[in-house]
């Protein structure tokens, strides 16, 4: 496989990973909320708390995704296996 195929597969895999982490974080936070907090709040506060849980799940998935990406970048030589998405990347200097 070439760099472009590797890049596309990585983007698809990373997107799927991010979606799964977001869903897992949302369900986990919703479970914790349901067991510990829900009975102590009024109905209006319960409705708004779902929105807060959703935003917190997105933020938590972003943190986990960044951590996983940093681990991957330490182990894999990105320039060797992946192509640039935006721009041309680094060009070698031209000898004149």
Image: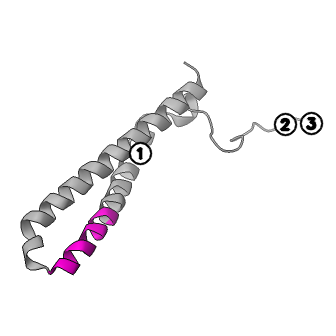
Question: Residues at badges 1 and 2 in contact (C-beta under 8 Å)?
Answer: no
CA–CA distance in space, label 1 to label 2: 33 Å
Which colour assignment does the render follow?
one colour
Q: Which residue is mark 2?
A: 94
Q: Nearer the viewer, mark 3 or mark 1?
A: 1
88 or 45: nearer the eye?
Answer: 45
Q: Nearer the viewer, residue 84 or 56?
A: 56
Residue 86 is covered by the magenta coloring: no
Disc sitting over residue 96 in the figure: 3
73 or 36, which lies in front? 36
Up the image or down, 23 lies above or below 36; here it is: above
In what quadrant of the picture does the N terminus appear? top right
Which circle marks residue 14 in the picture? none
Residue designated by label 1: 69
Q: Is residue 2 left or right of residue 37?
A: right
Disc 1 crowd, CA 10 A, few/some/many (<14, 14-19, 20+): few
Do the CB atoms of the residues marked 2 and 3 lie less than 8 Å apart?
yes
């Amino acid at each position: 496989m070439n760099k472009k195929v590797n890049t596309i597969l990585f983007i698809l895999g990373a997107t799927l990973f991010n979606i799964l982490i977001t869903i897992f974080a949302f369900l986990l936070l919703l479970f914790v909320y349901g067991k510990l907090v829900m009975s102590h709040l009024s109905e209006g506060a319960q409705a708004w708390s779902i929105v807060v849980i959703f935003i917190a799940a997105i933020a938590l998935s972003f943190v986990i995704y960044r951590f996983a990406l940093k681990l991957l970048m330490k182990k894999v030589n990105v320039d060797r296996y992946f192509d640039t998405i935006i721009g041309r990347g680094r060009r070698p200097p031209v000898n004149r």
